[in-house]
Amino acid sequence: MRYALISSLVLGAFACSSSPVAPRPVDGGADATVRGDAAPDDAGDADAGPALPYPLTQQCATPTDAGDGCGQCKQEKCCLSREKILPAAVDPLIDCMAACDGKPAQDDCQAACFAAAPQYEGAYREQFACLFHNCQATCGGGGNACTHCIENHCALENMACSLDRNCFLGNTCSTACNGSAACTEACYKKFSVNPKLVEDLVLCAQGFCQAECQP
């Protein structure tokens, strides 16, 4: 699971901005409460506002079987989406997506995986969004300052991109861009990414995570 994906999308989108954009307020006011800003990924009961929606928050029983930290996190925080991808019929999609990691055309590889199993791709992205929010440290190598800041403050905007097929693939495409505005723009166009999904995420990141996510 490559949790650095979303920071690549944000870095490229920052670079694409040709004019300053007014940042979001960072004082924890009404906007933050509505969006349910909170600290994910074993950050404790830091607080804030109403619970985030499914698939970011899931009611799970205490795991009955032991396992590594990632397995425990999946059971404790992503049990419902996990159940959707456990049937044997879904395993080929999981294996296919895993095999795409590190390939030169990872985005095309993932698109082919989704096309081969369209009935399961939604469940896969739900699990991705949940693990991104809750299990970066245990399942994704710890993420980075940008991804952690985004999940602390922009969880809804990030979730919207992760759950959307085109935004998910455009995000994967942008990992090879290294912050290049032209390359990132080409990724958006390649997958016809909804501009609002990117704009909402970037506006939030500019308001809360300028230092952490700047190129």
Image (cartoon, rainbow, N blue to C red):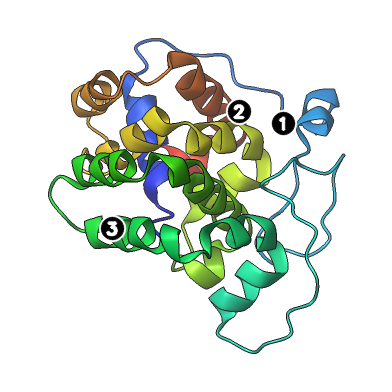
The answer to whether residue 58 is above or below residue 142 is: above
Q: Position of residue 57 (x, y in %)?
A: 74, 51
Front residue (pair 169, 142): 169
Q: Which residue is mark 3?
A: 96
Q: Which mark is residue 207?
A: 2
User: Which corner quadrant holds the N terminus?
Assistant: bottom left
At which x and y percent is residue 118? 39, 39
Q: Mark 3 to mark 2: distance in Å?
A: 36 Å
Q: Label 2: few (<14), some or many (≥20) within 10 Å?
A: some
Q: Answer yes or no: is residue 215 visible.
A: no
| Vertical comparison of 201 with 57: above or below | above
Q: Which of the two marks, 3 or 1, is nearer to us in this view? A: 3
* Label number found at residue 147: none
Q: Is 173 on the left-hand or right-hand side of 159? A: left
- Residue depth check, mark 3 versus mark 2: number of the one nearer the observer: 3
Question: Which amino acid type corresponds to the residue marked 3 in the rendered image?
Answer: Cys
In the picture, the quarter occupied by the C terminus is top left
Q: Position of residue 131 (x, y in %)?
A: 56, 58
Q: Which residue appears at 83% of the width and 44% of the height?
A: 51
Residue at x 44% of width, y 68% of height: 141
Label 3 secondary element: helix
Q: Secondary structure at mark 1?
A: loop
Residue type, label 1? Val
Callout count: 3
User: What residue does disc 1 label?
Assistant: 26
Residue drawn at point x = 41 percent, y = 37 percent: 214
Task: Give the SS element for disc 2.
Answer: helix
Query: Which three-letter amino acid code belongs to the residue tagged 2?
Result: Gly
Mark sitting earlier along the chain (3/2): 3
From the viewer's perspective, is residue 47 above or below residue 153? below
Badge 1 local density, few (<14 within 10 Å), some, or many (20+)?
few
Horizontal and vertical percent position of residue 3: 44, 55
